Amino acid sequence: MAVDASGGSVGYEPVIGLEVHCELATATKLFCSCPNSFGDEPNTNVCPVCLALPGSLPVLNERAVDLAIRVGLALHSDVRQCTFHRKNYFYPDMPKDYQISQYDEPLNAGGWLDLPSGTRVGVTRAHLEEDTGKTVHMGGTGRIHDATFSLVDYNRAGVPLLEIVSEPDIRSPQEAREYVAELRAILVAAGASKARMEEGSMRVDVNISVRPAGSASLATRCEIKNLNSLRSLVRALEYEIARQAEVYRSGGSVVQETRHFDEDTGRTASLRSKEEAHDYRYFEEPDLLRLVPGQERVDAIAAGLPAMPAQRRSEIAALFSSAGAGTGGGAGAGGAREDQIAGLVENGLDGLLLAAVNGGVSPEKALARTANEAASRIDEALALDPESYGRLLVMEEAGKLTATQVKAVLSEMLDEGRGDPAAIAKRLGFETMGAGSINASVEEVVASNAAEWDRYCSGEDKLAQFFIGQVMKATRGKADGKAVVAELQRLRSTR
Amino acid sequence: MRSAGPGSPARPGSPEGPDSSEGSDASSGSTPSSGPTPPSGAMSIAAIAAAVRSGEASAAGIVEQYLGVIEAMDAGVGAFLEVAGEAAIAAARRVDALMASGEDPGPLAGVPLAVKDNMCTRGVATTCASRILAGWRPPYDATAVARLAAAGAVTVGKTNMDEFAMGSSTENSAVCVTHNPYDPSRVPGGSSGGSAAAVAAGMIPGALGSDTGGSIRQPAALCGVVGVKPTYGMVSRYGLVAFASSLDQIGPLTRSVEDAALLYSVIAGHDPADSTSIREEPEWTGRLAAPDILEKGVVGTVVGLLREITDGADPEVRSRVLEAAEGLSRLGATVEEVSIPELRFALPAYYLIAPAEASSNLARYDGMRYGLRLGDGSAESVMSTTRAAGFGAEVKRRIMLGTYALSAGYYDAYYGKAQRVRTVLVSAFDAAYRRFDVLLGAASPTVAFRIGEKVNDPLAMYMSDVCTIPTNLAGHPAMSVPFGTAPAPGGNGSATGPAMPVGVQVLAPRLGEPAMFSVAAALERIAPVTEPPVLDRQEL
Ligand SMILES: [Zn+2]
């Protein structure tokens, strides 16, 4: 079916609910003591329990429970007594051929998440379950239908997952994207998960139906499984909304089914219908006891919960308004700044920015360096000592290092995971140039490039870049670009 | 040590203590053509451990002696699936080395034991008597097995069973038939039939079995040995290949109550690897064989003669139970009849819950990671072909029953209702135990039936467990104690068959093991003298 994703949904409103699976950042798996780590040699992090050898039994990882409770509290859920159930179905990457999950009594029930745009999305539940292994299909296109054989890596089998199910409160692909981004920020803030879609530690399934705009009824929904990036999430939803709208417009009816999103074509296609859906034969897991998180435990976890993203974002935004700076940038600049702040908070890098500001760096400079430079290497940046990072930016603010030099020193600090910025700058030979020697160098360059100097003086401002480049070359990058421009302007005005 | 009571069958003419000369030539000298009357058959676990610990006998000598007996006798009994002789002798030598270096070799030093083939033994095949696990060697020991080894005991081999412990005659083994040592044409009961037969035949002084619906007590009764099903959670299930997780318990089969108490004491206790294992160990953990329990007597004990598991038994079996009750009364117990009508729901509830859990527990045998693997290469083909060929008929029957009971639309009517029955049963037992210290009844409604007699009648086979199943659903302890014999029905209902052992069952409330063992020890002291099986290898 040809679907016009851009205009096909006019007159229809989507109703979207999301199921987000995230891997909890525990040291070990949910029911055994194997390491929970990503990217290791296949089938090395395995034992009798997570390979489901006969006679093995699960033992619940209490740390996973703590992390799940942290998320529950951050989502305003009711943390309560719960049970584990077996979800039975056969699949080669699931060693027991059942998954230990939670069914009618989840650990976290109810709750909500406020989107930065203001919408409140209800949370149905956030429950614990174990991950499956990973199947790699070999030969053909790498999809199961034309593979010649498949390999299974059980390193991931038994990794703790939290499944967070939203109410169908989302009304657009953009809101869905916003929900996932905000949820991700909360998971990272709570220290519960790395929540990286690109590594598969966060995966999104959507339930979507469309109805005539203004209608209050719920139509038949489809599920789209395993969306592995925010971009795929938006594309899949846009396509599916248009598809379902088109079905209704042409007098048809939507069939309840599970659909797969094809990254290459940008389309969704039927995976299995409701009739083919598994009967999971849920029953209470007899190998585990009822989980009763006592009030004391929940209270202790609540007391240790750090500030959540919304609060941190507004605290950082307040730095800009209180400084009375940057308000002249217009709505566009403000929006870009909001995005940058949101990005830093989502990845947990706002602590670096705050350390720099506390050291006396302007919020704008601190935001620019952190969002542009530090955030380009998130993992390493997370390992930085915020205080050292702050001192580095202070050196720039004080004119002791140029922008280029700051980037070079930061790069070293990220490589090493630590380090004193002053010592690194010294090692790299970045002695600060005095104003006198910069001015001397500028004069030299101006004298030997007379033609360019004339053009600059006649108003071709872009030639400033040329002179900066020449001065940098002459000083081997030690000059401060801003100081060069200032001297150029001074010379021009006195010419 | 107490001398062997009349209820603990002793091989006629065999000495009570160890005989070092027997141990030295056991491997070569125990294959004469005359019927085996191994002296080791009469040795109790307590006697062996005492002899090894005092230095009177070497563990290696004892183990070699028993290996010789097994070698001589098991061809006719079919109790063992695998005998790990070399490993056993090596383990026994380690015990002897500990003795030599002056270290404590443990309370079960040098005691040879057999383990049902559904318990993991590191490096020794563990197959559950199923084709689907043929040749599978676990990389780890079950906790119960490891505890025995830590106590100095030596596991010499793995015993036959109904496939995945599903059955009451051991005829569902995919490997071989096990014969009842009292009459080789009859079954040993099941599913721990290999363990029961091995102990009854004197091939081993004790064995571990597992009891999901009576799989220790029923074969113990049919083979005339003691069999104990502990309170759920007293013995770790880690390493026990699961049949029905909420019902399975490991327990001992032995020739005397004291030996059962000794084994139980070693295997019991909290295990962090089993979440359902009881955290707060009762005071008596590890000391059930103490005189204040086994010699306590029954004066003042209030015993309920449980009609639901007595009246329906064969008349001769029922007579032995009534005689046991009268005997306890003479010893000073108060015995009253009691009825728990709710017990009639136990069998149907069990045959929903156990298969439901089994259908899930046995899903992992899919040909992907271990065991049998058949099929043309696609995952679906491997799984379905492997399971179709690897499981026997009874296992498939129960997987289908359980799958059905858990299916959408049927769950509430079947599995859900069965779980509610379980709650009702526990309350009904609780009410009875407010009046009674223990309950008494038959462990099996019949004596051992003939091989082949019930294989084509699953419902008749299921009825074999009618006396034992309620205990499992309640999570309570119960044990079978040999108490005389009853004539087996002859062929075609005509002539009277041979005298076969009868087991009287003692039931107790949750963690009521001390009272249960006190009563069992008293019963053992008053039980009629039973001639042990005389195994003629020509006949076998
Ligand atoms: Zn593991």
Image (cartoon, helix red, strand yellow):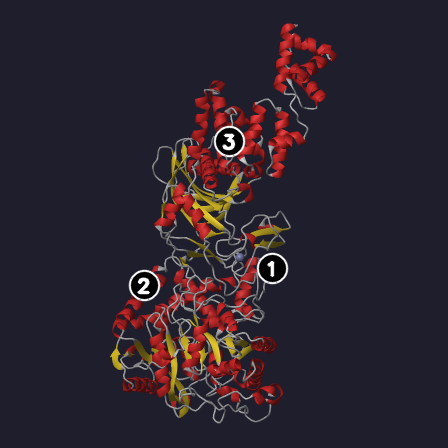
Would you place residue B488 above or below residue A362 in this image? below
- Classify mark 2: residues with Cα within 10 Å, few (<14), some (14-19) or many (20+): few
Would you place residue B173 above or below residue A183 in this image? below
Q: Do the residues labelled 2 and 1 touch (CB within 8 Å)?
A: no
Q: Which of pointers 2 and 1 indicates the residue nearer the eye? A: 2
Q: Where is residue A270 in the image (x, y as percent from the top left)?
A: 50, 46
Q: Where is residue B339 in the image (x, y as percent from the top left)?
A: 26, 76
| A168 with respect to A133 (left or right) | left
Q: Where is residue B302 in the image (x, y as percent from the top left)?
A: 27, 78
* Ligand 1 under 8 Å from disc 2 Cβ: no
Q: Which residue lies furthest to the right in this view?
A: A448
The alpha-carbon separation of the residues under discs 1 and 3 comes to 58 Å
The alpha-carbon separation of the residues under discs 2 and 1 comes to 43 Å
Residue at image mark 3: A355
Residue at image mark 1: B377
* Ligand 1 under 8 Å from disc 3 Cβ: no
- Judging from the image, mark 3 belongs to the subunit labelled A
Q: What residue type is labelled 3?
A: Ala
Q: Which residue lies furthest to the top in this view?
A: A495
- Classify mark 1: residues with Cα within 10 Å, few (<14), some (14-19) or many (20+): few
- Judging from the image, mark 2 belongs to the subunit labelled B
Under circle 1, the secondary element is: loop
Q: What residue type is labelled 2?
A: Arg
Residue at image mark 2: B420
